[in-house]
Image: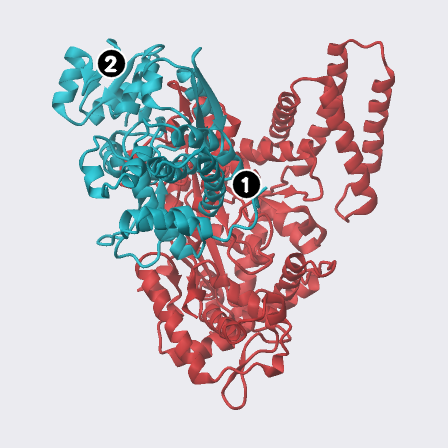
Amino acid sequence: MPSRNSSKPKLIGVVGVGSFGAAIANMLAEKNQVMVYARKEEIVEEINSQKTAAGREFNPAIQATSSPEELCKACDILFFMIPSSAFMEVVRNFAPFLYPYHVIIHGTKGLTLNLPEGESIETVKKLRRSQILTMSEVILQETVAVRVGCLAGPNISKELSLGQPAATVVASKYNEVILEGQQLLRSEKFQVYGNSDIVGVELSGVLKNIIAIAAGALAGLGLGENAKGLLISRGMVEMVHLSKALGGSVQSVIGLAGVGDLVTTCNSVDSRNFTVGFRLAKGETLDQILGSMEEVAEGINTVRIIDAFIKSAGIRAPITESLHRVLFEDLPIGEALQFLMKFPFSVDVDFV
Amino acid sequence: MEEQYIKHRYEPILPKKDEWPVVKLARERKEFVKKVSETAESKILQLTGNNPDILKEELETTLYREKLRIKQNPWAVDPDDEREFWSDVKNSLLHLSTESSLTKTKKLEAYKEVLGKITSRYAEEIASNFKTSHYKFTRSVVTFGFSRLLNAARVKGFKSIFSNQYTLQDKIQITGQTDQIRDLATKGTIVMVPTHFSNLDSILIGWIISVLGMPPFIYGAGLNLFNISIFAYFMNALGAYKVDRRKKNLMYLETLKTYSKEAIQFGCHSLFFPGGTRSRSGMIESKLKLGLLSTAIEAQRANYQNGIQDISGKIFIVPVTINYHFVLEAPGLIQDYLSITGQERYYKENDEFSTSYKISKFLVKFFTKGSDISVSIGRALDVLGNYVDQDGNSLDKRGRVIDTRDYFISDGKITVDAQREEEYTQMLGKRIVEEFHKINRVFSSHLVAFVAFEMIKAKNTKLDLFDLIRLPEEDIVLPYEEFKSACQMVYDKILEMKNQGLIDVAPHMNRPMDEIINHGLDNVGMYHAKRPLIKDKQGNIVTEDMSLLYFYHNRLHGYALEKLF
């Protein structure tokens, strides 16, 4: 039964070497020894020998491994930076090597489903909240680790890699996780805020991707700044209502992880979700877009899950609903816009 | 098979009374009380940041509240010198505040002295007065006396007087993980957490513990129970320490928690009613009072800090549910609940357990006429809510052995983090509630009350709870056949859930539905003046008291069974 007593300085673990994972690994490596995990042997090889992977530079001090066991043994603190579609599987691979002393912080802005064997989002009649998991809920369900946190905020990987100033939110029920995250990540160019409403912060990051797709679509249609202002403000109201329905607090949506990230993503051509909306508006189909994207746009999956949830829960979320019809039911984007303009919003703000 | 198991006779796990932790504690009572008082004192100093001004404020608040309590809510058990003591505190505080020449350190010293007086008074007040002779006597009264009553009523012949436990166990069935709790009690420290529906629970659990061959557990009993002489005697005999719910001040609460924590660390098996008080609604507790529960976690961490890594320092949480057909206090409890949630009017507590006479009358009824009680002992958990194996090792969801110590580690060391332990306490609370639902045993009376109430509700969808309760009883008639098929539907669902390990069912439920219904109707709230559920002359189901029906119905709340209607 391994129980840690040694006082030898520990490595910080990063699981996943996508663009965000690589950016975080490099930031962590400024102050600490870092070990990254990648599933593919050739990528591990590449990082260890050339300090690059898929064109991304790695700090020369970073070591890589393809063994979950090695990473869990070497590190007490792990950052999980993997897409939501692979999250459950990766966490399950790590679970046998995780112990209650591990601290896990993730940076994934997506949701996953927890359905009975043989069921999928197409077959399930009602999607209840208990069947939707945020990534921290996946970790708590699948592993014995309890000290779990998340990273969320306007953190475009490209800008982080260039060392431009930015900030993030570390959210956890445990103060020690927040403090640990702050201590590891804070630098002259990177501010770290704390929040105890982890589900609210996760949901903020997740839900803003829906609005980002819509913002991309508006830009693709060549609409102006008035329309964008309208979308961001209505989008925020929708986020607040959805977040509340899913167990988050209003405050978190108004913070850096919500509004902060929303504004950034809705203005960024570097955002994958924005790009999906943009290309849709230019007439491409979803399959064409997905076929040519290297990394996952979390917003697409989020739209499906949230749409199924609101239908089961009997609540309305017009932006999500119209996006769902555009993405999966072949509604022309112009008609969706008309639907939104006609939707009877009578009150500007009704949640504070 | 099951009957055999229920009536198993358990040998004492510690035959020599001198080895009982509670006896050891009683022997060292004086030093123990001193230790509690000092530890509480330093904890409070830490909480006030060693700042004389904050400490002064806390002392003044405590003084104010105590004076108010003495004036507004005096009890028979309160010591005679209370007024005097608090007047002294007041004088000392007055004296200190006029003394302007004192330095900050001197001031702190002086306030500390006042604080020390208060914590040692509280510690002394809380501490139990366990005496082995009283314990033995009480146990004889409960087992032997009650069994004789029982035997007299059932006329089993002269010899049956000598087989006390067997016959008492006919009435009170003990099921579940009895061997595990016995085994773990010899290796580590047990904290038992039962559901709480009736004032009878304390005595019942005390008896169960003795039947299982375990040394007495200590537990916090509401000081109000000590007002009733018959209870006071029993409680003291069973190793109860006193919890005064009127005292909500920081000093008292810290002393109380320290007492509990130190006793657990001492190795005393403990008992908390984690609901804090009897369930007013009749529902299984869903929100637990976490104050005392947190002391189990603190004690576990402290044991690890003190280097006790093996099972002797391990603390096991054992959830227990107590199932009744009949709760004597039900009318008062449900009135409380309705007036609190309905906020209609202030309702004065109507405690049916108010006199020794009433209790004795109930006990005679209970033992002569019969109403089964079953006690289910759940699987032991560690303080984080993980199941443990026969050697006391914690297991994760996949059955892998993990070390509870790891939960308290950061940077490779055991650390004290109050905020973390607060979260852990919440987690543990949730796990206990989950376990309560799993080990809860459905009785026929729970089933019939649940079905009847839900049928009435389904027929009056427009009415809210309070309107439902106010429906004229004479207008409510449930045709028997309809009622029976609804019972069958719920019963089938319950069996399905039982197969998934989500609920348990009493053996008397293993018979044709007509018999289950008759058994249920005969037993549900059987001694109330107004019966919650009866059959009328035409054979239809009617009620005499809607709020009581609601109370007994609530026992099956929390399983989403109402969705069947």
What amino acid is labelled 1 in the image? Leu
Q: Let me know if residue A24 appears in the view.
A: no
The C terminus of chain A lies in which quarter of the figure? top right
The label shown at residue B290 is 1
- The chain letter corresponding to red is B
- Is B414 displayed left or right of B35 in the figure? left
Q: Which chain is represented by cyan in the image?
A: A
Q: Residues within 10 Å of mark 2 (few under 14, many from 20)?
A: many
Picture residue at 20% right of the left edge, 24% below the top: A38
Residue drawn at the location 39% of the way across and 46% of the way down: B182
- Give the chain of mark 2: A
- Comparing A205 with B481, the one in front is A205
| B175 lies left or right of B256 | left
**Residue B54 left/right relative to A63:** right
In the rendered view, does B99 fall on the left or right side of A278? right
Residue lying at the far bottom of the rendered structure: B538
Residue on which the image places disc 2 = A58
Question: Is disc 1 on the same chain as disc 2?
Answer: no
Q: How is the image coloured?
A: by chain
Q: Which quadrant holds residue B528?
A: bottom right
Chain letter of mark 1 equals: B
Helix, strand or loop status at disc 1: loop
Q: Position of residue B9 (x, y in %)?
A: 39, 56
Looking at the rendering, which quadrant does residue B32 occupy?
top right
Mark 1: few, some, or many residues within 10 Å (few <14, many ≥20)? some
Front residue of B314/A81: it is A81
Distance between mark 2 and mark 1 Cα atoms: 47 Å
Q: Secondary structure at mark 2?
A: loop
Q: Is the Cβ of the residue at disc 2 closer than 8 Å to that at disc 1?
A: no
Quadrant (top left/top right/bottom left/bottom right) for the N terminus of chain A: top left
Q: Residue furthest left?
A: A42
Q: List x then y, in percent, for residue B301.
A: 46, 28
